[in-house]
Image (spheres, coloured by chain):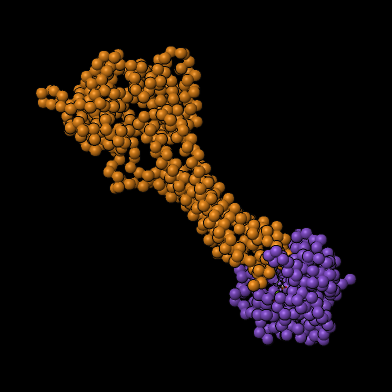
Chain colours: A orange, B purple
């Protein structure tokens, strides 16, 4: 019997093709939208990680408490040894030292007197060292709009907007006025080797990037670092794994109450990113819910039209002695088949496009000016395990719900009435 | 025991606040092998009565015993079971399923009965032979003439060899020649298989074939007469 009904289903395009297309279109959108949003969120998380938080960040306990102020007097001493220990503990991750610092950037005229001056935020990273990944992590080559990357420890990169504001050019000298690790005043001359775009107004207003050795020199921070960032090799953040790692680190290193003992924080526990991550998690359910409702309504309506069209069939089947309940159940079974086929088609299409965008990417640098430190100039989707089943939830449920709703009318109606209506 | 026995059947329909009485105190019995018809003007209650016989509708009052079961006492499922095993329906608009072939349309009632493959094949072929449509088995209803369509509907009604066939205005959409063809076929079935036929009609062509005419007027039986019927 079911075979017989499926045969009919396949032959009746308006009963099979249209609902399958509706379901697959909705499922396609669900899957694609989900992957797209995952990609967008992943990009956001990734720029935070690359620029600021790492996948995990190691600081001294005291530094961690005041982390927003970059209190370098509380920095990690003997940072090289700690990095070695971190490598020993977790060799499949990348460990990089960073120094964040604040101060004034002073631009002198020919006579050595102040021409312009502005507060500056700086980031010192391992960009000169052979084989260092930092150039890549900070997307320095991509974001460079003028000049070259630093070739020595006393060269810096400066945000172009900031440079314009200060009136400096590539090749000029600027003096960093700050404080050393020990609290005394520091003055250090840097040469500007190139200009960058960070891609975020707040950063573009006042940021410089320097090699960490130069910063150590300037701020008297030999073998020290404010922060040590850890990254997984595939650059994909996993909250569970990183939280676990941080806990393990805590057991090993932060046992004492010493305020200079190191602590490790996963990305999810920095700068409110945890809430953001849980939002990302629930996003899947939100998208699914929206598309499920929309699709159910469309399918309900097409189901209603279909059952009007199928009145004759329904009446005849009842007259021939098919019990109403069986008829209803078989109609639902048809909708399950439609739902599965449509969901499979939509999921395939959605994943195909998402995979293309994941590996090839949609380069919109034609529209945007350039890539920046924070925002890569490509839209990239993310495909994960969820992508494969997420579409089936709205696809199947909408198909079944739509049919069930439209079928209820028939189910409720008196057999005799149905029968009469079909005679007209 | 008669095949159909109706006692004091009343059927009312709600109509706004009032009620409309479509059948008033119907008493009727039909024996196995009869070839009879409910005759009357439009709105006289023919279809309503036929639906009660077919267990598609419950009477408001009275008792209707069909094929040994009291219609009012049957559940949906039991009524469906009874229709499936023992009754065939023929409609004015043939009501064939357009996406299925002639063969499949005739096969459908047997699938509902869950008949085994081999039996099914024999029965369908026999029924198609009966109505002379063996060569159209692969056609779709859309490719058939009105007369052919109604012959398929007849094949579908008789394929399970039901005891009772209910036919509501079976010739209303057919020309004279096709009407006579169909009716000749039904008479033959009635004679050879002892299938009982109950018609609802006001078509003179049908009436001329009946061996018993039950006249309905305004929801009442006004005359119940034997007739010669065409052989
Ligand atoms: N569901 C219903 N609700 C209210 N009134 C109904 C309903 N069904 C039928 N009727 C009324 O009952 C009466 C008998 O209807 P029925 O369909 O039995 O007539 P009929 O003799 O078959 O007529 P026709 O020759 O036109 O088919 C009509 O007046 C009709 O309006
Ligand atoms: Mg009628």
Q: Is residue A216 above or below residue B111?
A: above
The front one of B131 and A408 is A408
Counting from the top left corner in percent of width and height, residue A41 is at 42, 39
Residue B229 visible to an observer of this rendering: yes
Quarter placement of the C terminus of chain A: bottom right
Q: Name the quadrant containing residue B104.
A: bottom right
Q: Is residue A249 above or below residue A290?
A: above
**Number of marks in the image?**
0
Q: Give the residue at x 36% y 47%.
A: A362
Q: Which corner quadrant of the figure contains ligand 1?
A: bottom right
Q: Is residue A279 above or below residue A307?
A: above
Q: Name the quadrant containing residue A231.
A: top left
The front one of B110 and A14 is A14
Question: Most extreme residue toward the left, as rendered?
Answer: A111
Quarter placement of the N terminus of chain A: bottom right
Question: Most extreme residue toward the right, as rendered?
Answer: B1
Q: Give the residue at x 49% y 55%.
A: A25
Counting from the top left corner in percent of width and height, residue A307 is at 61, 63
A12 sits to left or right of B185: left
Counting from the top left corner in percent of width and height, residue B81 is at 77, 62
The front one of B216 and B129 is B216
Counting from the top left corner in percent of width and height, residue A377 is at 33, 42
Q: Give the residue at x 58% y 55%.
A: A402
Q: Give the residue at x 75% y 80%.
A: B40
Q: Is residue A33 above or below residue A45?
A: below
Residue A174 visible to an observer of this rendering: no
């Amino acid at each position: 019997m079911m075979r017989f009904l499926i045969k009919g289903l396949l032959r009746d395009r308006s009963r099979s093709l249209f609902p399958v297309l509706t379901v697959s279109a909705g499922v396609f959108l669900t899957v694609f939208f989900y992957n797209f949003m995952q990609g967008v969120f992943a990009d956001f998380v990734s720029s935070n990680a690359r620029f600021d938080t790492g996948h995990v960040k190691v600081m001294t306990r005291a530094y961690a408490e005041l982390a927003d102020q970059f209190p370098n007097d509380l920095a990690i001493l003997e940072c090289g040894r700690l990095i070695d220990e971190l490598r020993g503990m977790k060799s499949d991750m990348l460990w990089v030292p960073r120094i964040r610092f604040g101060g004034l950037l002073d631009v002198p005229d020919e006579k050595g007197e102040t021409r312009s001056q502005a507060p500056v935020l700086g980031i010192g990273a391992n960009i000169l060292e052979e084989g260092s990944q930092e150039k890549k992590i900070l997307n320095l080559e991509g974001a460079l709009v003028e000049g070259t990357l630093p070739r020595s420890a006393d060269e810096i990169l400066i945000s172009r907007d900031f440079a314009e504001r200060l009136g400096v050019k590539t090749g000029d000298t600027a003096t960093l006025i700050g404080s050393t690790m020990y609290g005394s005043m520091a003055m250090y001359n840097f040469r500007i080797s190139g200009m960058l775009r960070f891609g975020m107004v707040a950063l573009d207003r006042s940021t410089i990037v320097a090699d960490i050795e130069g910063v150590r020199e300037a701020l008297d921070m030999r073998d020290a670092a404010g922060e040590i960032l850890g990254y997984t090799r595939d650059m994909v953040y996993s909250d569970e794994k990183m939280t676990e790692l941080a806990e393990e680190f805590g057991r090993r290193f932060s046992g004492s109450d010493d305020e200079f003992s190191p602590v490790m924080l996963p990305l999810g526990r920095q700068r409110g990113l945890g809430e953001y991550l849980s939002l990302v998690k629930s996003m899947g359910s939100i998208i699914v819910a929206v598309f499920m409702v929309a699709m159910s309504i469309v399918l309900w309506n097409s189901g209603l039209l279909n059952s009007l069209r199928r009145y004759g069939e329904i009446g005849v089947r009842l007259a021939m002695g098919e019990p109403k309940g069986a008829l209803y159940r078989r109609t639902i079974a048809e909708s399950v088949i439609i739902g599965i086929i449509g969901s499979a088609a939509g999921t395939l299409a959605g994943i195909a496009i998402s995979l293309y965008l994941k590996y090839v990417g949609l380069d919109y640098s034609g529209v945007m000016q350039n890539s920046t430190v924070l925002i890569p100039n490509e839209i990239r989707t993310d495909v994960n395990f969820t992508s494969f089943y997420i579409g089936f939830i709205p696809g199947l449920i909408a198909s079944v719900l739509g049919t069930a709703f439209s079928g209820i009318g028939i189910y409720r109606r008196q057999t005799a009435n149905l029968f009469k209506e079909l005679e007209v | 025991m008669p095949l159909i026995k109706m006692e004091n059947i009343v059927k009312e329909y709600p109509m706004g606040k009032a009620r409309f009485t479509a059948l008033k105190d119907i008493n009727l019995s039909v024996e196995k092998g009869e070839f009879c018809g409910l005759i009357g003007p439009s709105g006289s209650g023919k279809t309503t009565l036929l639906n009660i016989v077919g267990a598609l509708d419950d009477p408001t009052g009275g008792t209707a015993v069909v094929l040994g079961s009291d219609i009012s006492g049957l559940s949906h499922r039991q009524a469906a079971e009874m229709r499936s095993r023992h009754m065939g329906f023929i409609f004015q608009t043939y009501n064939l399923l357009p996406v299925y072939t002639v063969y499949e349309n005739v096969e459908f009632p047997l699938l509902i009965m869950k008949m085994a493959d081999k039996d099914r094949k024999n029965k369908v072929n026999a029924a198609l032979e009966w109505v002379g449509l063996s060569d159209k088995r692969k056609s779709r209803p859309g490719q058939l003439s009105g007369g052919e369509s109604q012959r398929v509907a007849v094949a579908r009604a008789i394929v399970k060899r039901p005891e009772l066939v209910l036919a509501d205005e079976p010739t209303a959409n057919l020309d004279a020649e096709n009407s006579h063809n169909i009716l000749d076929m039904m008479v033959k079935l009635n004679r050879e298989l002892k299938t009982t036929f109950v018609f609802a009609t006001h078509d003179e062509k049908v009436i001329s074939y009946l061996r018993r005419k039950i006249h309905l007027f305004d929801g009442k039986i006004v005359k119940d007469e034997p007739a010669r019927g065409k052989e």
